[in-house]
Image: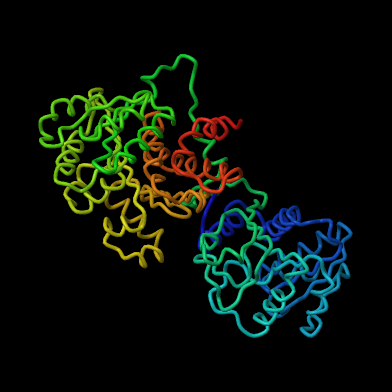
Amino acid sequence: MLLGGNEETRKIDEYAINTLGIPGIVLMENAAASFVKNLDLTADSYLVICGKGNNGGDGYAIARQLNALGKNITVFCIDNQNMSKDCKINYEICKNMNIKISSDIDELDELLINSRGVIDGIFGTGLNSPVTGIYREVIEKINRHSQHCKIYSVDIPSGINGNTGEIMGTAVKAFKTVSFVIYKKGFLNRKNKEYFGEIRVENIGVNENSFLHLIKAHYLTEKEIQKIIIGRNEFSHKGDFGKILIFAGSKGFSGAAKIAVNSCVRSGSGLVTLLTYDNILNEVSSKMTEAMTLGINSDFVEENFPEIEKMILNSDVMAIGPGIGKSEKSLVILEKLLSFKKNIKGNDIKLVIDADGLNLLSENKYLFKEIENRAVLTPHSVEFSRLSGFSLEEIEKYRFEICRDFALSNKVILLLKGKNTLITDGNEVYINSTGNPYMANGGAGDCLTGIIASLSGQNYELFESAYTGAFLHGYIADGLFKEQYIINASHIIENIPKYMKKLFCGK
């Protein structure tokens, strides 16, 4: 699903009208028809509240559609002066059809009380200043009566900034928002999600592929993932699904190694080998039936370099970081792993770097040159702050810009974990739609590392592996939440194959 803000919305409208040759009034009609499909049509009376721009024009067109269905319709016109061209056309048509139009603010409370559904067509994504005057009064009246009727917003709740999701003085609290073509960036504002209600995105009579060259951001859905699924043919063997080397675990942090390895195995890797310290090897090995291991002499790591080099050269993907600590020994091993850029087949060795791998990277920036064009970095906000030098406040406020610039300048794929995880290669951006707070506990990130590494070895591009892995990880947790309250990494690992079949095969 396409994702954008005010500028992207403007570009789509201009392209549809000026390049595709679709008149604005036709787009408005298509939007109205799509909107009506999302209403509770068991209600017999609707109040449509319209501004004077194109959002108001949508409202007048919706009023006509509902009138044609035999509904009892009243339109409240906030202002009929200086209307946009297409708004004026639909306003005049409503008048010609004798649809009741009121402009009396003193009558608005009674109209709201007598309506079973209210349609908010006051402001669209173009709002760029605080809501004041009669507009503020109307919005506040709508919210006061929201307990007894459903409020439906056209494109975005009036008063919400389409780019940031911030409230511009006041805003409509919608029961449902029916948006068009693109999922608005403003909807990602977590603190104001109560204003958006259920969000649906509809088209306006144009396939979204017509706009792909205009938009470089996407909101991940099942449909988006299913477009890239490779599948398996009957002649496949384990060598086709990747040899993964995972450097994880240290004394006191053996669980991170077990989680990363088991999630990688369960995600379908052909062969998985754990590289870890010998003082936890026996403990970890007993929990990993399908994976191989290579122990590192915890007192003299260089002793194992010949074996490690052989293992690197036979690997398609290396996952580095969960539970390795920030010791000098782990840094030496990290340097050794990163020094090999190609495997014995002559292919680039892909990298997935997480946790302490990121912490070591942030303290040893010279290593960035070793990972260019072949790595996924998976930090949470604090780790990304260390890597990028930006404060948490700056990252929160300018997340898209900072993440894109970081990925582009360092030639990496960045996966910034959190609610609505962001994944970017510096050009395109994917925002994850899955996941929930009931999976927020230790080991979740290690599990994600294993999933991404596994997909990377199964002939998916590194970028595809990152955003598919993020989606799958949260998709499993969302499914499990229907049956249980807390979701641990072990729960996700146990269910990876079942949910992969559901997502990848549609079964």
Q: Name the residue nearer the viewer: 363 or 63.
A: 363
Q: Residue at x 54, y 34 (%)?
A: 499
Q: Is residue 2 left or right of residue 107?
A: left
The image's colouring method is: rainbow
Rendered location of residue 479, percent (x, y) = 57, 42
* Residue depicted at 32% across the width and 51% down the height: 407
Percent of width and height locating residue 410 = 27, 50
Depth order, front residue of 344/15: 344
Give x and y (percent) for residue 150. Answer: 74, 64
Q: Please give left or right for residue 453 compared with residue 362 in the image.
A: right
Residue most extreme to the top: 235
Task: Work out whether residue 251 or residue 165 is closer to the camera in this orientation and state it.
Answer: 251
The residue under the point 19% across, 52% down is 365
User: Height in image: 257 above or below 185?
Assistant: above
> Quarter of the image containing the C terminus?
top right
Expressed as whole percent of the image width and height from the top left, the position of residue 40 reads: 78, 56
Image label count? 0
Q: Residue at x 55, y 30 (%)?
A: 501
